[in-house]
Amino acid sequence: MNKLRVAIIGTGMIANSAHFPALNVLRKEGIVDVVGIADIREDVAAETAKRHDVPNYYSDPQKMLDELKPDFVAVCTPNMYHKEWTIKALRAGAHVACEKPMALSVADAEEMWQTAKDCGKMLFPCQCMRWRNYMQQSKNVVDSGELGDIYFSDIEFIRRIGVPTWGFFHMKEHNFGGPFCDLGVHLIDSLLWIAGDKKVEAVSGAAYTKIANQGEDILLSIAESGAYSGTFTPRPYDYHEFNVEDFSTGFMRLEGGMTVNFKFSWALNLPTTNLDMVICGDKGGLSINKEKLYKNIGRYQSECDMKWFDNGEFKGVPFEQHRYMYRNIINTLNGKEEYLIKKHQNIEVTKAIECFYKSAELGREVNVKEIIGNKLF
Ligand SMILES: NC(=O)c1ccc[n+]([C@@H]2O[C@H](COP(=O)([O-])OP(=O)(O)OC[C@H]3O[C@@H](n4cnc5c(N)ncnc54)[C@H](O)[C@@H]3O)[C@@H](O)[C@H]2O)c1
């Protein structure tokens, strides 16, 4: 394959901290060129271009697509612009990787996948958590049958104070939602995949805004908000603009009878747990965070300490999972591998998002059939 000519739309935290480091590895290997970047904040695009030695920067992404005609575009804008720029980039003839959550409604997700098909291009949702070594190894444990028939899971990602303040995360008009869209989609995507491609049936959820809007008395930490490498050109934060949830919780029914409890927070008066996933089956239970497998030996209860090995090429670097994701993308484009995240799996996560926010609004369980009009996927 010729060198892939890559462009990025939206050059904020994730583009600088995750996409560029991953692309820079591939640039060094002579596999890709980053030909241009675009951000509606021209100063941000200019700084990023200088920092990462990119020859062209734009404040108008469409102009960049028209002039540079890239082979591949990474969409790293706030959530509300994912669909627009994914579709425009596909139509401009590029394969597209779109940051998570790729879509905010099932109808939007379908339109994006259909456009990719119509344009003969590939679409890569950046649900990068799946490349974590413990997620991949947990999937192996489940696939080996150790847990038996899986019927329950508890997933949580609790940040005691971890409101992302550098960009647009806290504003509904730009990001659509809070921690459910930010943290929840990672865990839901990984869980559905690990548990064997489960499908979402219904969600009963609640969304609260209780702490993040309390004002200047609340200390906020960039690192605890997920920007491990810091931020480069943050937008000034004003808590008065905060109008998404800071805590999302609820219960999800999956097809086949499995149920899931979930809690995702940017601010909650509980200890930080970051990421935790417990999966229970009739033969065993697995706590990914505690690295424990609970089984019976004969009639006796036992606990095995799991050792999650990490022999990976990118072990321990911030946002290492994006590097594995880009390897997988390149190998997929070269026909050597299949991309880990499939269309039907992306649609399931999108169903969860749509049902969750509808349920929180209506104060009752929302079945997938209500949002997709009984259509089967
Ligand atoms: N995969 C992960 O682990 C992970 C982690 C963090 C963020 N993200 C996702 O990445 C996306 C961006 O997050 P971020 O932290 O980089 O935010 P950010 O605010 O730092 O960066 C977004 C950039 O997009 C620009 N922008 C805004 N509207 C635009 C538009 N219409 N067209 C072009 N550019 C526009 C902004 O000026 C900003 O520079 C979000 O969707 C978020 O959910 C993913």
Image: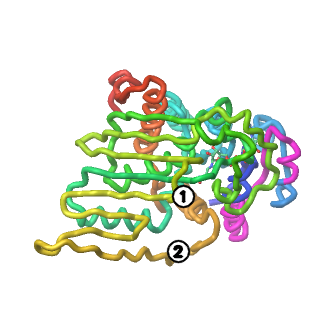
In the visual, does 299 lie left or right of 227? left
Can you tell me whether the CB of the residue at mark 1 lies under 8 Å from the nearest atom of ligand 1?
Answer: no
- What secondary structure is found at the residue carrying circle 2? loop
Callout 2 amino acid = Gly
Residue 326 percent location from the top left of the image: 59, 59
Q: Can the viewer see residue 3? A: no
Q: Nearer the viewer, residue 322 or 252?
A: 252
- What secondary structure is found at the residue carrying circle 1? loop
**Per the image, is 46 magenta?**
yes
Which numbered disc flags the more N-terminal residue, 2 or 1? 1
Quarter occupied by the N terminus: bottom right
**Per the image, is 249 magenta?**
no
In the figure, residue 330 lies in which quadrant? bottom right
Q: Can the viewer see residue 236? A: yes
Within-10-Å neighbours for mark 1: few <14, some 14–19, many 20+: some
Read off the magenta span.
20-47
In the visual, does 59 lie left or right of 360? right
Q: Nearer the viewer, residue 362 or 121?
A: 362
Name which residue lies at 19% across and 58% down: 282
Quickly name the residue at label 1.
272
Residue 315 percent location from the top left of the image: 57, 74
Residue 143 percent location from the top left of the image: 29, 62
Within-10-Å neighbours for mark 2: few <14, some 14–19, many 20+: few
Ligand 1 rendered quadrant:
top right
Asked if labels 1 and 2 touch by Cβ distance under 8 angstroms, the answer is no
Quickly name the residue at label 2.
312
Residue 240 percent location from the top left of the image: 73, 33
